[in-house]
Amino acid sequence: MSNSPTPTPAFTSTVTEAVLPGIVDPEGIQVRTRTARPAGPGQVVLAMEAAGVSFAEQQMRRGKYYDQPPFPFVPGYDLVGRVVDVGQDVPRELLGRRFAALTKTGAWASHVTVDAGDLTEVPGSVDSAEAETFVVNGITAWQMLHRLAKVRPGQVVLVHGANGGVGSTLVQLARVAGARVVGTASAKHHDAVRALGALPVDYRAPDPEDRLRAHAPRGYDAVFDHVGGEGIVTSWRLLAAKGTLVSYGTASTRDVQGSSRAPVLKLLARLTLWNALPNGKGAHFYNIWAGRRRPGAFRARLHADLSQVFALLADGALVPQVAARVPLTEVGEAVRLAESGTVVGKVVLVP
């Protein structure tokens, strides 16, 4: 797929988008059309070629994402698309070129308006859906691995949910960094986890902590935990003397009724307490939006990190994990599949 300027796709008069009207089943997500709006100053309109279905949207559907907007709204954390319109002060040379963007919401649409400063160009040799699997997942994994845990060659790391979107990316990037990787996953995903380069451990088997400790008797140099809940205590215990725990979610409470903020606040309090202990270990909660109050530095960091990931993808050092490509008009099916626990990698919406 070429990424050089191409004949610019026609700017459409209507936009198709998936709207989350409230706390609904996947089939309750509504597909609507509206009148298209041109790009404003400093903005571009992307014709979506791929948009991801991530864990954040699964939480939003339940009203459980920490700072989601009020219903109704269009979900969609990230996308890859081609520029079809540019606003004032944006170079027309961007027209027809393909970019990735992190949006947090709004990407589940045929056309998405974003700030031009939020764009990262996609290598011409990379398929749009394959690139999409490494946008929010790639930024998240890269920053946790290199900016927080600072994983080095020869270290041993533990990745929970190694078959998932972020987990499978973490495994691959950790292997590229020269680390030995152990990954938790259900038994049906073990072959896929091995293929990524990690040693799989069944988290549902008896005594999972003992099984994990057997593969790193001195402890893990880094543990990446998206589960949260009481399981985070096990992750902390499995650390080596100067190991680093990186928590980046509360998946264990996804289906628990009650406040969306309480599990996060409890987790943050626990991590803060652990960091105060004089034992040499470190604990972090990763938030991809941290630092956005300094937009220039925030954008530069995101762009640099995603560019590193895309370069590895273009070189063949990373293997995309596209679980399925589902049309935007069948968004309910895509969400149900993503939530089923039966897939490896990421479900991707396509036009």
Image: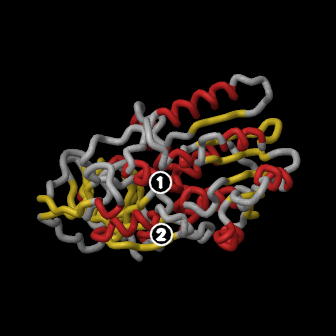
- For mark 2, give the secondary structure: helix
Q: What residue type is labelled 1?
A: Phe
Task: Report whether 334 appears left or right of 44.
Answer: right
- In the picture of the structure, the residue carrying the numbered disc 2 is 130
* Nearest-to-viewer mark from 2 and 1: 1
Residue at 76% across / 63% down in the picture? 199
Between 327 and 80, the one nearer to me in the picture: 327
Is the Cβ of the residue at disc 2 closer than 8 Å to that at disc 1? no
- In the picture of the structure, the residue carrying the numbered disc 1 is 55
Q: In which quarter of the image is the C terminus?
A: bottom left
Where in the figure is residue 121, as x and y percent of width and height? 41, 60
Residue at 56% across / 44% down in the picture? 248
Note whether 53 is above or below 261 in the view shown: below
Q: Earlier in the sequence, mark 2 or mark 1?
A: 1
Question: Label 2, label 1: how many angstroms apart (C-alpha)?
Answer: 18 Å
Where in the figure is residue 168, as x and y percent of width and height? 60, 62
